[in-house]
Amino acid sequence: MPTKSGSKKKRAVKNDLGFSPQQRALLEQMLFRSREKQRKQEELRLKGEGLQRSLFPSQTGFIGDERKKKLARCSRRAGKTHLAAVGLLTAAISTPGIMCPYITLSIKNARRILWNTLGEMDRAFGLDLEFRQNDLTVKLSNGSSIVLGGAQDRDEVDKWRGPKYSLCVIDEAQSMRTSILHTLIEDVLEPATLDLDGSIWMFGTPNASSSGYFYDADVFEASSWSRHNWTLLDNPHLPGAGDWLARRKEENGWSDETPIYRREYLGEWTRDEESMVYRFSPEKNLVEADLEESHWDFVLGVDLGYEDATAFVVFAFSEDVPEVYAVHAEKAPHLSIAEIAEKIKRLEERYRFVRSVVDTGGLGKMVCEEMNKRFELNLFPAEKSRKLDHIRLMNSDFERGRIQICHGPKTEQYVDELVLLEWDQNQMEKGRFIENENNENHCCDAALYAWREALHYLHREQTPKPEFGSQDYFEALEREMESDMIAKVKRMEEDEELEWWEVN
């Protein structure tokens, strides 16, 4: 217990600093707030340590990997979402005042996948998180935040530029377009982790096409990513997973080699042509070509959208060749009618279309007529009935190499969709063919409309005639004369067998 003389000395020291009573009170308040802030941060740090104790060994091995870029190829229900939440919260707690992004296919998917998990962890560990629904941001008491968002197009990717990150988590990477994911990681996120020596995590389940950025990062020996994989059978929080999976195999008639079983529940890369909407093959259907526009006829297909992108795809065909060529594809969201019409006009000036078709879904037909009247266009409504039948016909052209896509930036968005577009697996099990809503299909739909208008199927192979006066010419002439003589003799023989009144 301090003596009276000691208290007097402390007061004297304070008075020697020359502070007024008001200044001293303000200083004491600042010191109190600073200590309270440190206390809360220490309390939050201790709670954060409990987060990692909720992980099972496969997850602990992943989070303990010191590599800056690492991916996890997992089956369904393998615990990727829980691991992502733990990683983001741990990073946000350890470095006050930072932003940690969680990026997936779309804002809708980000909310569906991670938002509720963060809420459950807040309640379980008492983290006192603040949830902002408007911008899908979770605020921590130390000033850090976790931001959820999508990366559907380059505009959304560009929104992640600017801040510095200690951890970035990318989920559903198997369904992201190669060009988008490449730009997001290499042009945006990697430079943003430089200041804090941050990390990038990438999660995904194998896709049916066994292709894309995530596939390359996981499979190629020269990959710069540290690779991990586990399945739902490694998840101790699902003790009945083995029995459940055995029942599911029996109910669906799956064997150990069934692609969907190996892909979705064993987390193995297995190409499954039956699950792909289009039978596109880079080897058969990509070509290095730059067509001279004066020698071809062109058709345009337009798939209308607003929140979903509006897509424009141009096909070229000629009576001289049996193939049809995709020469241009682009798409953009939030286009007005005037902007759509202006884009069609620019394409029309370049390609001089013999036919331009626009989808008639929703208000499509009305929009089509309105654009014709207002902007002096010549658009026709696309036929959308029996879509599955037309996809199967188009797949026949893909398999025979009758569809060629001019490889390059002008068709990149179309190729990205073809590579990833799958049928919804749950609907397939019920005998219905519905495209997976996680995969974009806007360019694919526009291409389907344009392909139906192309007349490449009218091409017939012409047998070249031999040059006049050549050996081949005389041999062909001799065969023709011989054939004519044989036909004449046959007719005479038939006439002799008839009575005179039966002969014409």
Image: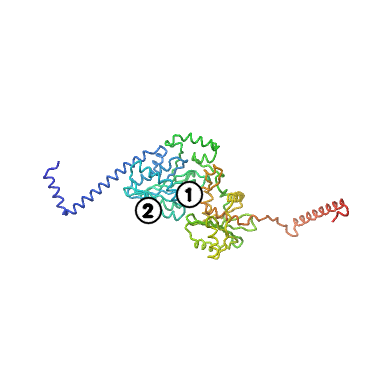
Please give left or right for residue 233 compared with residue 7 in the image: right
Q: Residue furthest left?
A: 5
Quadrant in the picture for the C terminus: bottom right
For the residue pair 275 and 248, the one nearer the viewer reads as 248
Residue ID at (43%, 40%): 79
Q: Nearer the viewer, residue 238 or 83?
A: 238
Q: Residues within 10 Å of mark 2 (few under 14, many from 20)?
A: some
Q: On the image, numbered disc 2 is attached to which residue?
A: 163
Q: Quadrant of residue 296?
A: bottom right
Q: Which residue is under mark 1? A: 176
Report the front residue among 295 and 386: 386
| Screen quadrant of the N terminus | top left
Q: Are marks 1 and 2 in contact (CB under 8 Å)?
A: no
Q: Residue placed farthest to the right in the image?
A: 500
Q: Which quadrant of the figure has residue 450?
A: bottom right
Q: Secondary structure at mark 2?
A: loop
Kind of residue at badge 1:
Met
Whether residue 355 can be seen here: yes
| Residue 159 placement (x, y as % from top left) | 41, 55
